[in-house]
């Protein structure tokens, strides 16, 4: 007997309200009352086309397999797989966002990551995590919520288990802005990192209160800076640079709230220590911390300036615009911050940091950002008159090709005091324009 012959009309068991609670791509959801028990539920019914029926059948089968408290349970379903009943939610994360704070977010992310990890262990990838598919059921206490992942109709099953191929190469899967980039290439090859990306984008949306745009980074700032590293590592566009597993994502959540309460300089010191020990991810977190505290000279001078040169160059290559901005902040702090009882020779470390960024930008051909940094670097270098750095700067200027010389020449020429600081008898450069500006008077 076929599934259609086994099917039971939902009206035989439930009284459906006329107005839908939600309308989706393959099914509608109604508020319904069980005719015998009088229990009020949400009833999801597939559209008439075959693909919709196949989707809801897969949703029923897979959701029933996933016995986890943070996965929407199925209370009842059609033997022919045309509809199913589930608890009536109080609302979605999208609708309830205004009543929640970032501690709530940490709890939600932690619990949902646990649920999704169970699904991934069974080879099931959701592929459509968004604020609309994260639903609140009544919690144990008054005014409390119990969060679940719903809408498993777009799930990717393990290879060989799909009874019928429902997804094609190039077919759009997921919610725009929350969907991982690789889903647009071949959603059938989705890995757990797809759901990691979507959950990270949910966090970004929650923290910034902005709807994400596909392919455009969205990172928290200001009061939510302690979340920035978490969001950045879970929402990398390149899947190979992204957190790969829900177990790893889940393990990072407690660190977010610890970071919120940790003094800035203590956190910076911890990140630098870990970076030097080989934890490469700490560099992005340290830079993000510096970006959020641009008036904290100790953070820049005692921590960021001590990032090893090779790691600075790698960072500049991956994020030239951001590196230029941070380097300019460092240079301005060198000029403007009270130096107090610090050894004057200590200034060489932050100056060397800025110089490394500038040199790397020139080598990359990122001449616009390089010129911006050069203006601040030359003024800071001249102000402090640190002999070792002056020598390194002149050696570098002498070796610049004409393109590099043309880049820094305008900012040099604009400051007579800077020209006089660098001018030296018998100095010669490869660049004609630099010879003209800095050559012997």
Image (cartoon, rainbow, N blue to C red):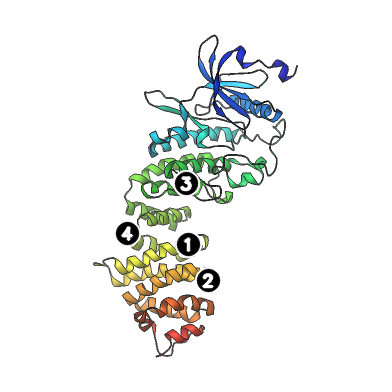
The residue tagged 4 is 295
Give the Cα distance between marks 3 and 1: 20 Å
On screen, residue 217 above or below 371:
above
Q: Earlier in the sequence, mark 1 or mark 2?
A: 1
Question: In which quadrant of the rendered view does residue 413 lie?
Answer: bottom left
Secondary structure category for the residue under label 2: helix
Which numbered disc covers residue 190? Answer: none
The residue tagged 2 is 363
Q: Are marks 4 and 3 in contact (CB under 8 Å)?
A: no
Q: Earlier in the sequence, mark 4 or mark 2?
A: 4
Q: Which residue lies most toward the top here?
A: 36
Question: In which quadrant of the rendered view does residue 329 lie?
Answer: bottom left
Secondary structure category for the residue under label 3: helix
The residue tagged 3 is 231
User: Where is residue 45 drawn, in percent x and y?
Assistant: 61, 23
- Name the residue nearer the viewer: 91 or 182: 91
Give the Cα distance between marks 4 and 1: 20 Å
- Name the residue nearer the viewer: 48 or 365: 48
Give the Cα distance between marks 4 and 2: 29 Å
Residue 218 as seen in the image, left or right of residue 50: left
Residue at x 62%, y 44% (from the top left corner): 183
The residue tagged 1 is 321
- Name the residue nearer the viewer: 276 or 46: 46
Quadrant position of the C terminus in the picture = bottom left
């Amino acid at each position: 007997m076929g599934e259609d012959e086994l099917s039971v009309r939902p009206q035989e068991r439930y009284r459906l309200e006329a107005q839908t609670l939600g309308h989706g791509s393959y099914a509608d959801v109604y508020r319904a009352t069980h005719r015998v028990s009088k229990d009020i539920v949400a009833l999801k019914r597939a559209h008439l086309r075959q693909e919709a029926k196949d989707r809801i059948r897969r949703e029923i089968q897979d959701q029933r397999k996933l016995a986890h408290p943070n996965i929407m349970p199925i209370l009842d379903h059609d033997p022919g797989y045309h509809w199913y009943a589930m608890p009536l939610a109080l609302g979605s994360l999208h609708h309830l966002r205004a009543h929640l704070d970032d501690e709530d977010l940490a709890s939600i992310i932690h619990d949902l990551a646990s649920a999704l990890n169970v699904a991934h262990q069974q080879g099931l990838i959701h592929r459509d995590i968004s604020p609309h598919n994260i639903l609140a059921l009544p919690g144990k206490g008054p005014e409390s919520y119990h969060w679940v992942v719903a809408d498993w109709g777009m799930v990717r099953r393990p290879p060989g288990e799909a009874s019928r191929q429902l997804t094609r190469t190039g077919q759009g899967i997921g919610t725009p802005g929350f969907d991982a980039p690789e889903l647009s290439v071949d959603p059938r090859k989705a890995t757990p990192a797809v759901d990691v990306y979507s959950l990270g984008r949910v966090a970004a949306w929650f923290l910034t209160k902005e709807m994400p745009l596909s392919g455009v980074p969205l990172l928290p700032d200001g009061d939510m800076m302690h979340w920035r590293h978490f969001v950045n590592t879970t929402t990398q566009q390149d899947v190979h640079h992204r957190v790969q597993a829900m177990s790893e994502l889940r393990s990072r959540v407690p660190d977010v709230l610890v970071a919120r309460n940790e003094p800035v300089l203590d956190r910076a010191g911890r990140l630098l220590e870990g970076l030097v020990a080989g934890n490469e991810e700490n560099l992005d977190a340290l830079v993000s911390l510096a970006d959020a505290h641009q008036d904290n000279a100790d953070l820049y001078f005692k921590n960021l300036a001590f990032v090893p040169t090779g790691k600075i160059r790698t960072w500049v290559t991956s994020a030239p615009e951001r590196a230029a901005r941070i380097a300019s902040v460092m240079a301005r702090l060198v000029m403007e911050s009270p130096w107090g009882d610090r050894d004057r020779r200590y200034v060489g470390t932050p100056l060397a940091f800025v110089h490394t960024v500038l040199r790397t930008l020139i080598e990359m051909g990122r001449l616009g950002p390089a010129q911006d940094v050069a203006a601040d670097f030359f003024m800071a270098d001249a102000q402090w008159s640190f002999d070792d750095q002056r020598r390194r700067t002149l050696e570098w200027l002498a070796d610049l090709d004409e393109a590099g010389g043309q880049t820094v020449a305008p900012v040099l020429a604009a400051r007579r005091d800077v020209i006089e600081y660098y001018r030296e008898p018998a100095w010669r450069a490869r660049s004609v324009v630099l010879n003209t500006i800095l050559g012997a008077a």
